[in-house]
Amino acid sequence: MPPEHVRALVAATRRRLVVALGLRRVVTAVGVTAASATSLAGIARGLVLPWAEPVAVGAVIAAALGAALWSAVARPSPLAAALVADRALGGFDRLSTALDLAARPHRTDREEAQLHAAEAWAAQRSPRGVVRLLPSRPLVGLALVALAGLALVVLVPSRADTLRAERAQIRDRIETAAEEVEEEAGGIPEPVAAELAEILERLRNAEDLERAAAELDTAAAELEARADPAALSYRTGLAALERSATAHPLGPEAGLAAQLAGLAERAASLPPDERAAAAAGLRALADQIAATDRDLAQRLTDAAAALEAGGATPQLRHALDRLEQLAGVVADADARTRLAGALRNAAAGLRSSQGRGEGEGQGQGQGQGQGQGQGQGQAQGRGSNPQGNVGGGGARGPAAGPGVGNGGLGTARAEDDPATTPKRAEIYDPILAGGGPEERVEIDGADPGEVLGKIRGLGLENVPTTPYYDHFEDYLAAATRALDDPNLPSDVRNVIADYFTRLEP
Amino acid sequence: MTPEEFADRYTRILDEIAKVIVGQRELVATTLRGVFCEGHVLLEGVPGLGKTTLLETLGRVLSVEFGRIQFTPDLMPADILGTNMLVDGRFEFHRGPVFANLVLADEINRATPKTQSALLEAMQERKVTLGGATHPLPRPFFVMATQNPIEMEGTYPLPEAQLDRFLFKALVPSPSVAELVEILDKTTGTTETVVEPVVDGPTLQAMASEARAVPIATHLLAYASRLVAATHPDDPGAPPEVRKYVRYGSSPRGAQAIVLGAKVEALLAGRPNVATEDVRAVAHASLRHRLVLGYEALADGVAPDELVDAVLAAHPAPTAD
């Protein structure tokens, strides 16, 4: 055990050494890392490296923490502290030699004398000033310069920052589009859901909005192409069957499938008259569906025959299976159609948000003036910029007495191609088109400035469109009602159903 | 003997020598270090710088048996060691001049290597073996040799083995003008300088024991070892100069010389232990004659002291590891 004052002096020196070394290591590590990080961040200003600045800042922090931790763990030995104290206090290795001699099991008289001399010497010395706690000014200065450089490079905006922000914005938009698609396509069957997951993955991997929109369009086309082509006719036929089942039910249950199932259960117990009525109903249904699906028609016919023969439970279940099979095909097709619509909407949304430049309206107007001026105009125009400003088309129809006026033409020019970014949510509405604001028009033959009449036509403010989604169901309901007409040939039904299927958003 | 007594005697020796030798502080100090370590010292310098005078003075001051051998090309080993002579029908050993406490081997490199080697056993083993009989040399025993620079005519370079047996090698510089004036004043007048003996043989041995008793820490032993290791061109700690110019580095005797010399240095400085400064102070005298330089060093005119400087610069202080 070293003498008391020797031990105390060495211990105090050691503590100061830990602090001094720690500070020096931290400053050095921060300076070196900051210089390297500045270079990295500087390079990242030219090249778009999204990870560069976070990595640079993180490296500096990690270096500082690492150096501090290292200093706390790798503390200098007592001998190292004694050597430092010897040099700083002019001890000529008194302390370090005393430490060494004190550790020896046996000592000579001269060695004991050395210990006493070292103890007396240490008792008169103070650890203050033995170790300079703060690092040298040049070292601190260089570290500060490196840090300032890093801060300058990181905080001053650069082209890379702008591009990075744009990328982030693009990612956000793509993610938003993906979420909207997921939300719109909720409740779709499992196979379609799997396809949707794949589509969304492709969407999220897209590098820009244009490619994302293209992916969505491609996916929508693929979805529609995979749909069973017979689904439309199945839906029409099944809808007709449901209406018939509602009008002439086979049982107390609601819905054709439930009625078939109920009938299958009580087939054996039906009285003859009800059996005959049910068989007639089944045959009527078979006739009704024969043009759409011969298989189901045959099964219904078989069930009717079996019912008349006193049985029919297996045949009814057989028909029910086919009915559910067809319903599944229709549901799958519906889901695909709905999903494709959602994808196209998302694509349109992405393209509209991508558009740059100013949009100018495209207008095409037709004015017809009759008598005191009743006009009808039509205008279509679309242009957009990133802020979503929409240009409208204008129409001005000069009318000549009872004659017909021609609407003026507008032009549209924008980077987005209006043809590829349709707003499916809006379609031309002739009712609205007739409800535009009154405009003053000049009619040939009158004196300049003389108002001969007013017309209602299209203007810059009244785009003659209507929400597509809001009205489609009305059109579809009307068409479905029309399909109920028993006089309508089945091939014509298919045409009508196909038409509305294509229109379906 | 206490350190204070040691220092007192050392001062008195210096004073007596200073009566004859003007200046040459480092030379005198190195020589006395060798004496207190009971080691051999080689003095190198051109003729006329007072090497022999210094050693003769030292012989008188130390009051020990003094033997002088003037090395010449025709000197034979028997002229140094002695010989067996037939006296009354019996061989009788007649001791040579090496049988003294302080042997002055003057101009040792003028003798042939064979004769030089005759000193080998005496210097290392402190005994002489002749005709099957071993004759111990008196204690203390020092060989103080002088030599001229080897590039001078009529000299034979000392073998490395023999060089290694010299604890220190001191270089004798030319005196300054002021020193030369004082030399002239002392040597060209009628006054005869009288030198008084200060210590005798047993006292010298006691002083040598006192020097060896000075404590030295392990990290300083490691530092001395590191310095010696760094003189080897294949050592990782060797500086570039050593790698380029040195063929063979110092032997372990170099480390022994450093430690012993450092102990004497610490004692003379009044320190209770050896310090780093003591180790560094004796590094040149301990290592300069132990470095075997390559032809490139000769071509570039690199002196051994420059290489020792490079070693000291590469290892400025002991470390804690």
Image (spheres, rainbow, N blue to C red):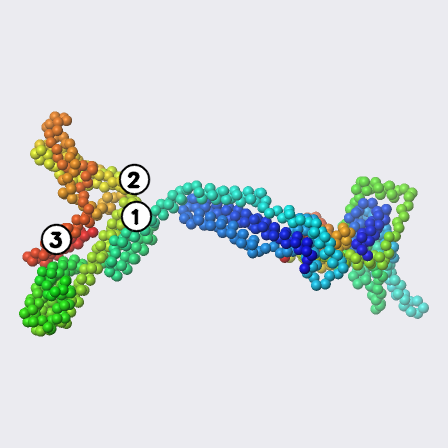
Question: Do the residues at discs 3 and 1 belong to one chain?
Answer: yes
Q: Chain of mark 3?
A: A
Between the residue at mark 1 and the residue at mark 2, the CA separation in whole angstroms equals: 16 Å
Residue A279: x, y in percent?
Answer: 8, 68
Which comes before the other along the chain, label 3 or label 1?
A: 1
Vertical relation: B38 (above or below) B194: below
The quadrant the N terminus of chain A occupies is bottom right
Of all residues shown, which one is farthest toward the right? Answer: B88
Q: Which mark is residue A331?
A: none
Of all residues shown, which one is farthest toward the top? Answer: A447
Between the residue at mark 2 and the residue at mark 3, the CA separation in whole angstroms equals: 42 Å
Badge 1 amino acid: Glu
Which comes before the other along the chain, label 1 or label 2?
A: 1
Q: Nearer the viewer, mark 3 or mark 1?
A: 3
Check if mark 2's residue and mark 3's residue have beta carbons within 8 Å.
Answer: no
Residue A344: x, y in percent?
Answer: 24, 51
Q: Is residue B291 left or right of residue A23?
A: right
Q: Which mark is residue A357?
A: 2
Observer-nearest residue: A258 or B293? A258
Q: Which residue is mark 1?
A: A210
Bin the neighbour count of mark 3 within 10 Å (Cα to Cα): few under 14, some 14-19, many 20 and up. some
Q: Which residue is mark 3?
A: A479
Mark 1 secondary-structure assignment: helix
Q: Chain of mark 2?
A: A
Q: Is residue B33 left or right of residue A324?
A: right
Between the residue at mark 3 and the residue at mark 1, the CA separation in whole angstroms equals: 37 Å
Residue B130: x, y in percent?
Answer: 84, 66
Mark 2 secondary-structure assignment: loop
Badge 2 amino acid: Gly
Check if mark 3's residue and mark 1's residue have beta carbons within 8 Å.
Answer: no
